[in-house]
Amino acid sequence: MSGATVAVLGAGSWGTALADCLARNGHDTTVWAWEPEVAGEVTEEHRNEAYLPGVDLEGSLRATSDMGAALAGAEIVVSVSPSHVVRDVMGRAARFLAPGSLLVSASKGLELSTGQRMSEVLEEAVGPEAAAGCVVLSGPSFAAELARRLPTAVTLASRSEENAVRVQALFQNEHFRLYTQGDVIGTELGGSLKNVIAIAAGIVDGLGFGHNTVAALITRGLAEIGRLAEALGGRPETLSGLAGLGDLVLTCTGALSRNRRVGQGLGRGLSLADAGAGLVAEGVRTTLVACDLARREGIEMPIAAQMKAVLYEDTSPRDALEALMLRSLKRE
């Protein structure tokens, strides 16, 4: 696919990296930014120092803070705002969407007030007809590495195989590889719930525990993500792939992981406010939603429960980790 007109709604690190990739692939790409100064810097200086410092962006990439201008004639619309503002941003975008435009959801998270996945939020924000066949993009991917053209592989999930293949062709290049599948539920839950486990992994590091602890945490974290995802209609094989295990390992171990950094700060004794200063760590909100969903479905999620205790109930990180280790003995 070549020469598509694309709007990327969200000029944070991930939105800018995806927009840059699309522009380098030869697509007519405009990114919408909340801040006019960010839009001006992207268009005029081909940089976004606030969110992707030190990265030279494709010269053809344009940005604007005018929603209508960004969406004018867009065949493909990529929603990539933080999860807590997706409903607002896409609600504003709805009246500008061209008939037949294809939506791509690249935001990871669960809406705090409703517990909904992002594709569900999109459907309510823009209407079921406009959101029909939405494609979810998820998987192990740090924005800074994609922007620097380091090899990256992700998952595209959609109920429409045709739409998934269309988006695959849009993004695919020599350093960005995309695999298609049909499990939207498992893909979105894997991309959301791994952030909760990543905060725990950061706490492990901040407390000075070792690789053994992190390995155990990742493995048991995957088990509880899988239990909830399956209860909600996701497929087990999805959680063993890029959208599940792949994203979980990256977010729990990578130095660029914002959720892991928040956990590290907590493990070192910082308050949540100080540990999360300047960071959009989706796992902080997602922890509450995960625990609510687990309770509703009768699913045991001990790591998520202990993260809720640390984040919202003044339990010390060390006490939370000890509670996990001292749970009653079980078969794996």
Image (cartoon, grey):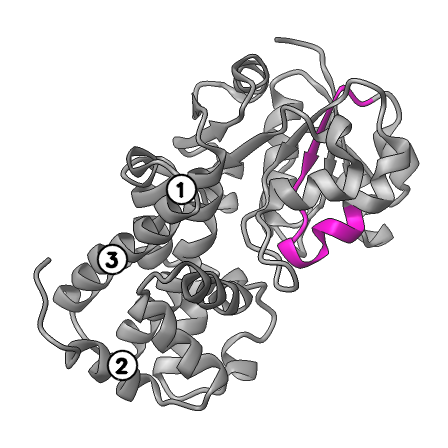
Pointer 3 or 1: first along the chain: 1
Q: Residues within 10 Å of mark 1 (few under 14, many from 20)?
A: many
Tell me the residue that label 1 is attached to: 140
Tell me the residue that label 2 is attached to: 207
x and y percentages locating residue 201 in the rendered image = 31, 66
x and y percentages locating residue 220 in the rendered image = 22, 59
The amino acid marked with disc number 3 is Ile
Q: Quadrant of residue 304?
A: bottom left
Q: CA distance from mark 1 to mark 2?
A: 25 Å
Q: CA distance from mark 2 to mark 3?
A: 16 Å
From this view, report whether residue 322 is shown above or below residue 154.
below
Q: Which residue is at the front of the view, 75 or 52?
A: 75
176 drawn magenta: no
From this view, report whether residue 133 is shown above or below residue 247.
above
The residue that appears at 68% across and 49% down in the rendered structure is 81
The amino acid marked with disc number 2 is Leu
The residue that appears at 41% across and 33% down in the rendered structure is 152
- Residue span colored magenta: 74-89
Q: Which residue is at the front of the view, 107 or 30?
A: 107
**In which quadrant is the N terminus drawn?**
top right
Pointer 2 or 3: first along the chain: 2
80 drawn magenta: yes
**Secondary-structure class at tag 1:** loop
Q: Residues within 10 Å of mark 3 (few under 14, many from 20)?
A: many
Q: Residues within 10 Å of mark 2 (few under 14, many from 20)?
A: some
Tell me the residue that label 3 is attached to: 218
Q: CA distance from mark 3 to mark 1?
A: 14 Å
Q: Of the residues tagged 2 and 3, which is closer to the observer?
A: 3
**Secondary-structure class at tag 3:** helix
Pointer 1 or 2: first along the chain: 1
